[in-house]
């Protein structure tokens, strides 16, 4: 069946030429050195549609939400997913996030049921239980007056959640080692995206690529072991309710299962995406709350009013609007996925203008989310801007941390529920006091703090006490 073309934007697209670059390298040095500043300059100094060059790649950068919406909606019609380097493919393989055409439609149909709202509901208890255990560990830090490294703690927590929901159990002593392997993979992918390695053929083995291969070998070894063990369970595996069991049980319209390689690719991609993006979002959330006592006080009030000392459940998600607004505003200011590229096919258009085949078209949640045309006081942390009665409505696709169109992130619902429930659980136990000063973001594979974010844990004086403080819900 032929997919109808995306509706053209009502805003005409008129590209202007951006900054001149160097021979062959183009704007790669400027982009690689400070990508967020470079993209912001394109938006502010040149306009909504700017041509530039990333090495040999002819590129177009979009800033208007209507053009962004049209691009994202057209990625299965007249735009292809851009291969963002050799390193990225080592992790994702041929999973749903990089496959295209009929292969993408088949895999999406097989993977999507594993993260539908009904399934996310079944994972909520696991999310809260992992957060409760983390909160109890944090209180030990508070008693000893020890500093907490926020990003490392968030990564450990979200890894525990994704491992239990994906594989049905934790990995014990292997968790930290595999978390370190995932960290290496993310670093190498981010460095490759911003540098000359992006254009090196796959057979070139730089030191960073050798580290990448070793890290992926560790990940693959553990994932393949778990897949093999689950297959060996036979019919008993069908009684499990984790993501891996659902991937193994999935059948397409012709009754075909995912191959072992396909199960590996989807499992590792779900692991990487579910672990890293949520931990990054929560790291920035704690940073922002530490600098916003009014927002934190309102969070405390909401948790006291709605939960009154008990642990949250999935039914509380809709009853915690301020908690959800905090997460949404953190995703606006510090979107983990900060850049989205696509490559134009023959016949591609945007805003009624033909886009030459082979052009790489980029849009950035970072620049769109901080555009003063769509967000009043765009650098300020204001969760209230997401209230239903807020005076300034946000245009469609001025906020798109999970992408958009047909290829919207499959795990968007999972991530938002997880972030809100983890925050609601942890914030009932503790405050994180972070020293004053701004934190610079580093644009790698994801938008991470450039330096460690350390916090002093302070036990919350009210809200969770007595039974709750000692593990209610066990």
Image (cartoon, rainbow, N blue to C red):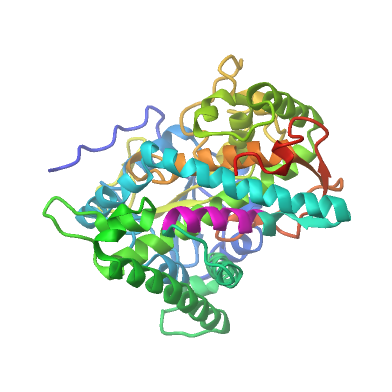
Task: State whether residue 412 appears in this view.
Answer: no
Given residues 11 and 198, the one toward you in this image is 198
Image-based side of 469 in relation to 338, left or right: right
Q: Magenta part of the protein: which range? A: 154-166
Residue at image point 47% right, 75% down:
216
Residue 161 magenta-highlighted: yes
Residue 175 in percent (x, y) is at 57, 67
**Which one is in front, 377 or 459?**
459
x and y percent of residue 441 in the render? 69, 53
Side of 255 relative to 295 (left or right):
left
- Count all numbered tags in the image, as a single digit: 0
Q: What secondary structure predominates along the stretch shown in magenta?
A: helix
* Residue found 35% across the figure and 70% down from its top: 229
Q: Quadrant of residue 311 in the image?
A: top right
Residue 30 placed where, x, y %? Answer: 63, 61
In this rendering, the answer to whether 236 lies above or below 91 is: above
Front residue of 154 and 388: 154
Q: Is residue 21 left or right of residue 88?
A: right
Split into 4 quadrants, where in the image is the C terminus? top right
């Amino acid at each position: 069946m032929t997919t109808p073309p995306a509706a053209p934007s009502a805003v005409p697209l008129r590209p202007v030429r951006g900054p001149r670059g160097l021979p062959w390298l183009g704007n790669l040095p400027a982009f690689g050195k400070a990508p967020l500043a470079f993209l912001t300059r394109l938006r502010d100094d040149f306009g909504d549609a700017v041509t530039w060059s990333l090495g040999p790649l002819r590129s177009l950068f979009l800033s208007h939400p209507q053009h962004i919406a049209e691009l994202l909606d057209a990625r299965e019609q007249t735009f292809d997913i851009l291969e963002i380097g050799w390193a990225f493919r080592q992790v994702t393989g041929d999973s749903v996030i990089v496959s295209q055409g009929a292969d993408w439609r088949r895999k999406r149909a097989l993977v999507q049921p594993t993260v539908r709202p009904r399934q996310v509901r079944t994972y909520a208890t696991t999310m809260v239980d992992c957060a409760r255990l983390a909160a109890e560990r944090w209180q030990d830090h508070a008693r000893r007056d020890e500093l907490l490294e926020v990003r490392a703690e968030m990564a450990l927590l979200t890894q525990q959640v994704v491992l239990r929901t994906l594989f049905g159990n934790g990995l014990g002593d292997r968790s930290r080692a595999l978390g370190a392997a995932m960290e290496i993979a993310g670093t190498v992918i981010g460095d490759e995206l911003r540098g000359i390695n992006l254009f090196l053929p796959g057979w070139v083995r730089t030191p960073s690529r050798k580290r990448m291969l070793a890290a992926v070998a560790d990940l693959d070894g553990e994932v393949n072991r778990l897949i093999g063990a689950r297959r060996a369970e036979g019919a008993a595996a069908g009684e499990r309710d984790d993501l891996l069991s659902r991937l193994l049980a999935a059948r397409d319209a012709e009754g075909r299962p995912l191959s072992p390689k396909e199960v590996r690719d989807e499992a590792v991609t779900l692991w990487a995406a579910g672990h890293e993006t949520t931990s990054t979002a929560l790291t920035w959330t704690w940073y922002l709350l530490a600098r916003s006592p009014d927002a934190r006080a309102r969070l405390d009030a909401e948790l006291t009013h709605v939960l009154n000392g008990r642990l949250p459940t999935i039914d509380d998600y809709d009853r915690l609007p301020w908690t959800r607004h905090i997460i949404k505003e953190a995703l606006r200011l510090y979107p983990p996925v900060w850049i989205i590229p696509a490559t134009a096919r023959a016949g591609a258009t945007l805003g009624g203008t033909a886009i030459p085949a082979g052009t790489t078209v980029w849009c950035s949640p970072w620049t769109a989310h901080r555009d003063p045309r769509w967000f009043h006081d765009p650098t300020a942390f204001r969760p209230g801007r997401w209230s239903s009665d807020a005076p300034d409505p946000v245009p469609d696709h001025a906020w798109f941390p999970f992408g958009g169109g047909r290829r919207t992130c499959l795990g968007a619902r999972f991530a938002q529920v997880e972030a809100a429930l983890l925050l609601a659980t942890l914030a009932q136990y503790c405050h994180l006091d972070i020293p004053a000063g701004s934190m610079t973001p580093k644009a790698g594979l994801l938008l991470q703090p450039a330096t460690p974010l350390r916090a002093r844990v302070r036990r919350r004086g009210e809200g969770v006490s007595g039974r709750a403080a000692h593990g209610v819900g066990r």
